[in-house]
């Protein structure tokens, strides 16, 4: 098996993660409360990029590699970098290494991709070609490789083992993250829209008000509503367009309901039923519902 060791140098939020070959967290140094809610068994996600007001005012052509520990100071309408202790007359912010390390990571490393037009099948083809024809310690002195009649751009001077690692990370992104993020778009406040494997609309509520709206305002009687049994979480609505609902559609929606719930890692029961079998009483809190009858499916988080 292959593992990844990730150090997040984020000041008070610094942490250590060990990931397995599926990109799941199998160890973390400590529990940190942030928007990612990472814990063992969950797919690793990058930290949210922090914005530093001073840094946003630096010139666009500013060379981040020149930055050392120092101070960012306001000088009139300008922003300057001071390596020594600044004058008391200047408004300054200590510029520690981790602040620009984040900028380097996001702007130069994480955002540095291979050709964005690569498809998953092309990435797999390139990995197979590299593993068959090159040693892992080889270093490319060209800016492209030829596979048959196809020409693929690569970073010049990169080591084969590193390139293969980046390609596998790309595949993981295709398989684990992109399938959620690429189809997710904000439909309205607190509601996201997805597409099921058969192309049906799927609505996901991210708040009690949004859950109520999905179920009782947007949902039709024959639409299917999904919810994790026994835990707070999203209402997931599969819009019935009259075409057959597949097992893949059911599993997809159940997985979404589990993903956006308070249930921990493991296999959990997700209930689902046509909206006509879902109800609430006036005494129930907004977002809470009951099922007159339902089916269920087990999915894993």
Image (cartoon, rainbow, N blue to C red):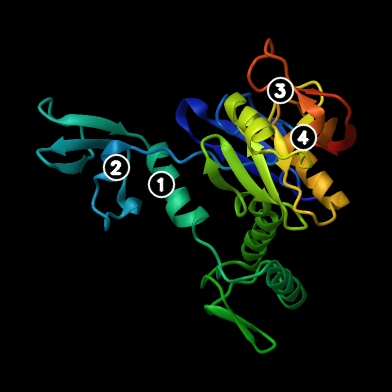
How many C-alpha atoms fall within 10 Å of the one at disc 2: few (<14), some, or many (≥20)?
A: some
- Please give the residue where the numbered disc 2 appears in the rendered image: 55
Residue nearest the observer in this picture, 72 or 252:
252
- Please give the residue where the numbered disc 3 appears in the rendered image: 232
Pick whichever of labels 4 and 2 is earlier in the sequence: 2
Pick whichever of labels 3 and 1 is earlier in the sequence: 1
Q: CA distance from mark 1 to mark 2?
A: 9 Å
Closer mark to the observer between disc 4 and disc 3: 4
Q: Quadrant of residue 225?
A: top right
How many C-alpha atoms fall within 10 Å of the one at disc 1: few (<14), some, or many (≥20)?
A: some
Where disc 4 sits, the SS reads helix
How many C-alpha atoms fall within 10 Å of the one at disc 4: few (<14), some, or many (≥20)?
A: many
Instruction: Tell me where residue 3 appears, x and y as whole percent.
Output: 73, 46
Q: Residue at x 56, y 31 (%)?
A: 35
Instruction: Tell me where residue 100 appears, x and y as whole percent.
Output: 38, 43
> Quadrant location of the C terminus?
top right
- Please give the residue where the numbered disc 4 appears in the rendered image: 275
Where disc 2 sits, the SS reads helix
Q: Are marks 4 and 2 in contact (CB under 8 Å)?
A: no
């Amino acid at each position: 098996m292959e593992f990844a060791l990730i150090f997040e140098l984020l000041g008070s939020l610094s942490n250590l993660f060990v990931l397995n070959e599926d990109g799941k967290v199998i160890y973390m140094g400590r529990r940190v409360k942030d928007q990612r809610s990472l814990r063992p068994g969950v797919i690793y996600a990058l930290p949210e990029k922090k914005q530093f007001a001073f840094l946003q005012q630096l010139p666009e052509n500013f060379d981040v590699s020149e930055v050392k520990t120092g101070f960012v100071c306001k000088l009139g309408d300008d922003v300057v970098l001071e390596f020594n202790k600044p004058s008391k007359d200047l408004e300054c912010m200590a510029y520690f290494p981790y602040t620009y390390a984040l900028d380097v990571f996001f702007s130069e490393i994480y955002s540095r991709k291979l050709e964005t037009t690569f498809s998953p099948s092309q990435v797999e083809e390139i990995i197979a070609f590299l593993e068959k024809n090159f040693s892992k310690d080889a270093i490319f002195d060209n800016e492209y490789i030829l596979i048959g009649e196809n020409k693929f751009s690569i970073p010049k001077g990169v080591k084969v083992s590193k390139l293969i690692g980046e390609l596998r990370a790309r595949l993981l992104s295709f398989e684990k993250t992109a399938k959620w993020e690429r189809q997710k778009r904000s439909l309205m406040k607190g509601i996201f829209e997805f597409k099921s494997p058969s192309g049906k609309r799927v609505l996901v509520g991210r708040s009690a008000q949004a859950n109520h709206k999905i179920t009782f305002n947007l949902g039709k009687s024959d639409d299917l509503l999904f919810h994790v049994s026994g835990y707070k979480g999203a209402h997931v609505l599969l819009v019935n367009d009259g075409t057959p609902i597949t097992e893949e559609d059911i599993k997809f929606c159940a997985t979404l309901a589990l993903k956006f719930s308070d249930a921990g890692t493991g296999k959990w029961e997700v209930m689902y039923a046509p909206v006509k079998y879902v109800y609430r009483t006036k005494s129930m809190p907004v977002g809470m519902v009951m099922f007159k009858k339902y089916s269920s499916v087990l999915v894993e988080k």
